[in-house]
Amino acid sequence: MNPYKMELENVSKTYLAADGTAVKALGPIAMRIPNHRFISIVGPSGCGKSTLFNIISGLVDNTEGAIYVGGNRVDGLTGITGYMLQKDLLLPWRNILDNVILGLEIQGVAKKEAKAKALPLLHKYGLKGFEHHYPAQLSGGMRQRAALLRTILYDRDIILLDEPFGALDAQTRAMMQEWLLDLWDDFQKTILFVTHDMEEAIYLSDEVYIMTSRPGTIKRHLTIDLPRPRKPQIVTSPQFIALKEEALRILSEETLKAYRQEAAV
């Protein structure tokens, strides 16, 4: 039996520039991800993190390499993973309940059945009483909750989250981290999480992949051996601080390289 939920085998992406020259944007990337793991990916701006997610989700074709889910090759296929971007992308003309069931409707689930499935989740995960409000009437944190529940209800084993808390204030972000860990544990999903915040990556994750500057490859793979369930106070523990210092040292080297790349253009 394959022990890995997802495997990336030397995945890379090369684009053609306007002048016809080949520009390598990503790779090769190799990752092996066990089931029900929380995996964070951190790297300098422009290193290809979002490109990697677009390839995994099937929205962009990889130039080389292969992606396997459950032992089956899936690169180029859409609908294999759930995918949420930093922007909540809630439809402003739909209320929160109707936004949350959108994925179910696309799958062909009757609206009445979809609402019956979604309502208990809205109540359990902090949106009770806001089912019939519209996105513009909700705070940023509440909109992100709705968007995450919509992604969960799409019911894929693997969830891609691309900086979902990047636009939130620090207090709301901390609350959402706790909420996400509860959601992850309840639904037993495998989560790939992109963030620029190293403390967030270590706090949430079982493993952290640190990428190089463009073209992004994996520079370091860290295993986060911190006990679960985790509480915010763990960020002051010696073990956490040591992990953070090591990770920031590695990341700062690549961030400096990325800055020099941009300055040379």
Image (cartoon, rainbow, N blue to C red):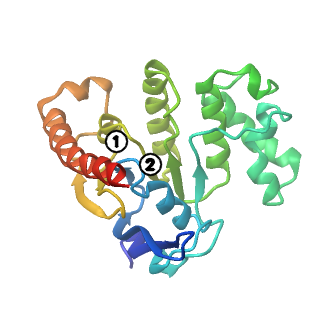
Q: Position of residue 263 (x, y in %)?
A: 33, 48
Q: What residue type is labelled 1?
A: Ala
- Name the residue at 51% across, 47% down: 162
Mark 2 or 1 closer to N-term? 2
Residue 22 versus residue 57 in the image, above or below:
below
> How many numbered circles are shown?
2
State which quadrant residue 156 falls in.
Answer: bottom right
Residue 17 versus residue 131 in the image, above or below:
below
Location of the N terminus by quadrant is bottom left
Graded by Cα atoms within 10 Å as few (under 14), some (14 to 19) or many (20 or more), the crowding at tag 2 reads many
Whether residue 84 sits left or right of residue 47 in the image: it is right
Residue 201 numbered mark, or none: 1
Location of the C terminus by quadrant is bottom left
Nearest the eye: 202 or 119: 202
The reply to whether callout 2 and callout 1 are in contact (CB within 8 Å) is yes
- Name the residue at 76% across, 32% down: 96
Q: Position of residue 147 (x, y in %)?
A: 65, 39
